[in-house]
Image: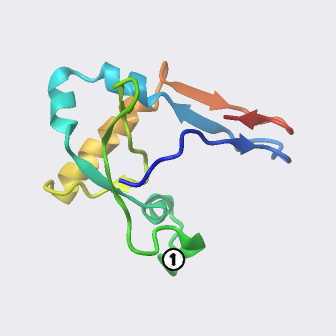
């Protein structure tokens, strides 16, 4: 797997008068909340990750799969569980852009990924940032 970034930064220069919030989910806590059987099932599974997939689910269909240079050679296959190389702590390493777990049917894959995201993206594991001009979130 290619090296993943250690952090991301989002900044707001101008914000809309309403809406535009950004939500962050604690995927380490989401992993910790899973029962042992589910954790064991997820170990070794991978899923494809595509911005085109998640945007299509929201109703935006791209005319090309080479927009902005994202995965010009096809959607990358990434592990669903990531282990921190220094601490050994595990986390769920996927999001709404994930699909197609090899070895599972499309329905099984979608059901499993949706359940993971639905469980991860709710309190207390969820933070919603309401932007103000000049905000920087790391």
Q: Quadrant of residue 35?
A: top left
Question: What residue is shown with label 1?
Answer: 66
Seen in the image, is 3 located left or right of residue 33? right
Seen in the image, is 1 located left or right of residue 121? left
* Within-10-Å neighbours for mark 1: few <14, some 14–19, many 20+: few
Name the element at disc 1. loop
Residue at point 42%, 62% (across, down): 53
Q: Nearer the viewer, residue 82 or 26?
A: 82
Q: Nearer the viewer, residue 83 or 109?
A: 83
Residue 74, position as x, y percentages in the image: 38, 71
Q: Quadrant of residue 57?
A: bottom left
Residue at point 70%, 43% (across, down): 10
Seen in the image, is 49 located left or right of residue 67? left
Measured along the vertical axis of the image, is residue 94 above or below residue 77? above
Residue 69, position as x, y percentages in the image: 55, 72
Measured along the vertical axis of the image, is residue 134 above or below residue 70? above
Outermost residue toward the front in this view: 86
Q: In the rendered view of the protein, which quadrant contains the C terminus?
A: top right
Colouring: rainbow
Residue 121, position as x, y percentages in the image: 46, 32
Residue at point 49%, 21% (across, down): 123
Residue 28, position as x, y percentages in the image: 41, 26
Number of disc labels = 1
């Amino acid at each position: 797997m290619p090296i993943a970034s250690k952090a991301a930064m989002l900044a707001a220069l101008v914000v809309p008068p309403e809406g535009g919030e950004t939500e962050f989910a604690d995927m380490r806590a989401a992993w910790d909340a899973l029962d042992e059987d589910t954790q064991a099932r997820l170990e070794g599974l991978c899923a494809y990750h595509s911005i085109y997939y998640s945007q299509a689910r929201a109703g935006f269909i791209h005319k090309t799969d080479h927009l902005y240079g994202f995965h010009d050679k096809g959607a990358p296959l990434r592990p669903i569980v990531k282990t921190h190389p220094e601490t050994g702590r595990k986390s769920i390493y996927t999001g709404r852009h994930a699909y197609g777990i090899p070895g599972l049917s499309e329905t099984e894959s979608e059901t499993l990924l949706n359940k993971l995201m639905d469980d991860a993206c709710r309190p207390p594991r969820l933070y919603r940032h309401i932007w103000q001009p000049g905000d920087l979130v790391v």
